[in-house]
């Protein structure tokens, strides 16, 4: 979280940010009256760590340090026109941007496209946030070749696969014991279980 009390970016409305600020300022009154972190945490139903963070901020910067800083969302480094252009580049696929070995966009590839086209650097985490902001999400590729011939695959399945697969044996003679009787016959006489070989049945 950037700043001392930056609220969670897009999740809080202005009213929720104001309510949280009021809680922090009310806690400041208790802290100034000499209440412990544990008492503040219990009174406002927050963690002791939050109460201690508020105490340190109050000591360092007064009540102003507990004020809401507004929406914590970072400003986008790209203009709306650049975002539209980026969406068009992503729609065209990685091959159009020089990655023709597979049809998968990765965060690193997209960050490279943004750096080359717009001269803007993004970390991978920042690129992930940007993509979510413009409506893109992580997708698992279907692992299919671009040159896939559906007609040839269907023909192979009908003609060649039954021959390769062959008939399945529905019953195979077997043995229910874990000890194979063929292996038991070659045991030395002093081996464990060798006495069972000598039984008449």
Image (cartoon, rainbow, N blue to C red):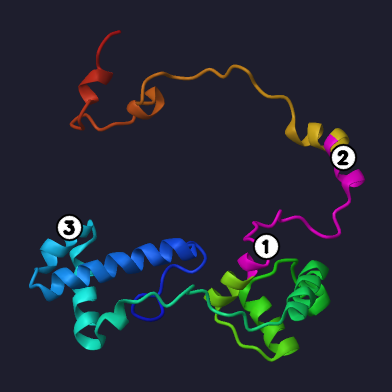
Reply above or below: 59 against 132. Answer: below
SS at badge 2: helix
Total labels: the figure holds: 3
The 10 Å Cα crowd at callout 1, few under 14, some 14 to 19, many 20 or more, is few
Quadrant in the rendering for residue 35: bottom left
Report, in whole angstroms, how far the alpha carbon at label 1 lies from the one at label 3.
Answer: 41 Å
Residue 5 x %, y %: 35, 75
The numbered mark, 1 or 2, whose residue comes first in the sequence reads 1
Q: Looking at the image, which residue is at 27% across and 69% down?
A: 24
Quadrant in the rendering for residue 30: bottom left
Q: Which mark is residue 135?
A: 1
Residue 107 x %, y %: 62, 73
Left or right for 2, reference 52: right
Residue holding disc 2:
154
188 or 196: which is nearer to us? 196
Judged by depth in the image, the label closer to the viewer, 1 or 3, is 3
Q: Which residues are magenta?
A: 131-157
60 or 131: which is nearer to us? 60
Say if the magenta span includes residue 66: no
Q: Is residue 100 visible from the viewing direction of this image?
A: no
């Amino acid at each position: 979280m950037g700043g001392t009390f930056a609220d969670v970016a897009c999740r809080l409305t202005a009213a929720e940010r104001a309510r949280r600020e009021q809680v922090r300022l009310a806690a400041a009154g208790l802290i100034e009256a000499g209440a412990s972190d544990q008492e503040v945490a219990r009174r406002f139903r927050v963690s002791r760590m939050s109460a201690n963070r508020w105490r340190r901020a109050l000591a360092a910067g007064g009540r102003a340090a507990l004020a809401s800083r507004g929406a914590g969302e970072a400003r986008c480094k790209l203009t709306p026109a650049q975002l539209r252009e980026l969406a068009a580049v992503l729609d065209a696929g990685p091959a159009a941007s020089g990655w023709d070995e597979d049809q998968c966009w990765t965060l690193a590839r997209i960050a490279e496209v943004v750096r080359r086209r717009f001269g803007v650097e993004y970390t991978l985490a920042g690129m992930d946030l940007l993509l979510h902001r413009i409506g893109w999400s992580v997708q698992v590729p279907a692992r299919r070749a671009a040159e896939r011939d559906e007609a040839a695959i269907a023909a192979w399945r009908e003609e060649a696969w039954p021959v390769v697969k062959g008939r399945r044996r529905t019953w195979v003679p077997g043995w229910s014991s874990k000890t194979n009787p063929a292996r038991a016959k070659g045991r030395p006489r002093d081996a464990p279980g060798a006495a069972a070989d000598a039984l008449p049945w």
